[in-house]
Amino acid sequence: MNRGPFIFIGVFIVLAFSWANLVHKPVQESGQLAAYFSDSERMPRLLPGEAEQGRQVYQQMGCVSCHTQQSRLESGFDIQRGWGSRQSVARDYIDQSPSLIGDRRLGPDLSNAAAGDRDREWHHLHFYNPQITSKGSNMPSYSFLYDKTAVMGQKSDRALNLPEEFAVESGYQIVPSRRAEALVAYMLSLQVDYDLPEAPNPEKIGL
């Protein structure tokens, strides 16, 4: 009796069962993740309108090619670097399409870009010319997102306060475009300062 077909069917069933449990089921479960609510607060938080526009600018500028948005505990020192307070998990990205996790760190991780003392002015100076804020940085300048305009009477309250060595000629100013403002709003929205059931803050559980 030729048992070849039965052996083939048996192997196929074993492989199909393994695939369903190891690959298909986890993918299906992660695709059905929903927001988590604690004290009526939704987590992850939805981006404000301007920050969502800035997310699109972030994509257009190709920032994901050099920056991740994924804090890791097992394979790095992200918490020690101040790049995160806990491990990133699938639920953190349920509102993102596409997800901007990234896979290379030519620049620092941006999961918590809004943490610390880097305000709107700092980010604008950094995008206009990274050498102003981070001397020696290999990040390119995004000065094309800024307009050089003549000062008409009083200087704009949105104009950048450039250091003397980077200042433009007298009578002119550098003003952020709407795209630059949106991009900075996105940076200021990036802060994973909430806990999830599957990803508690290590400090809160004594790790």
Image (cartoon, rainbow, N blue to C red):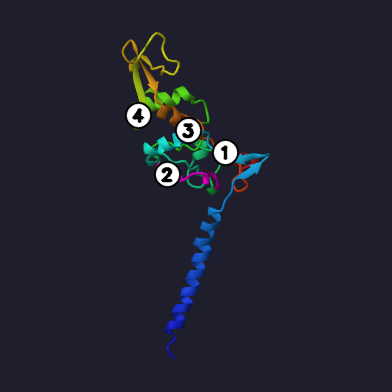
Q: Amino acid at mark 2?
A: Gly
Within 10 Å of disc 4 (Cα), the crowding (few <14, some 14-19, many 20+) is some
- Report the residue that reaches farthest toward the right: 39
- Which residue, given by chain and number where applicable, does mark 3 sit on? 186
Which element carries disc 4, helix, strand or loop?
Answer: loop
The nearer-to-camera label among 2 and 3 is: 3
Which element carries disc 2, helix, strand or loop?
Answer: loop
Start-end of magenta stretch? 91-104
Within 10 Å of disc 2 (Cα), the crowding (few <14, some 14-19, many 20+) is some
Please provide percent x and percent y for residue 98.
45, 46
User: Could you give the CA–CA distance between mark 4 and mark 2, rounded to whole angstroms?
Assistant: 20 Å
Any part of residue 5 in sight: yes
Task: Name the quadrant containing residue 144.
Answer: top left
Q: Amino acid at mark 4?
A: Tyr
- Which residue, given by chain and number where applicable, does mark 2 sit on? 102
For marks 1 and 2 on the same chain, the one whose residue lies earlier in the sequence = 1
User: Could you give the CA–CA distance between mark 2 and mark 3, rounded to whole angstroms?
Assistant: 16 Å
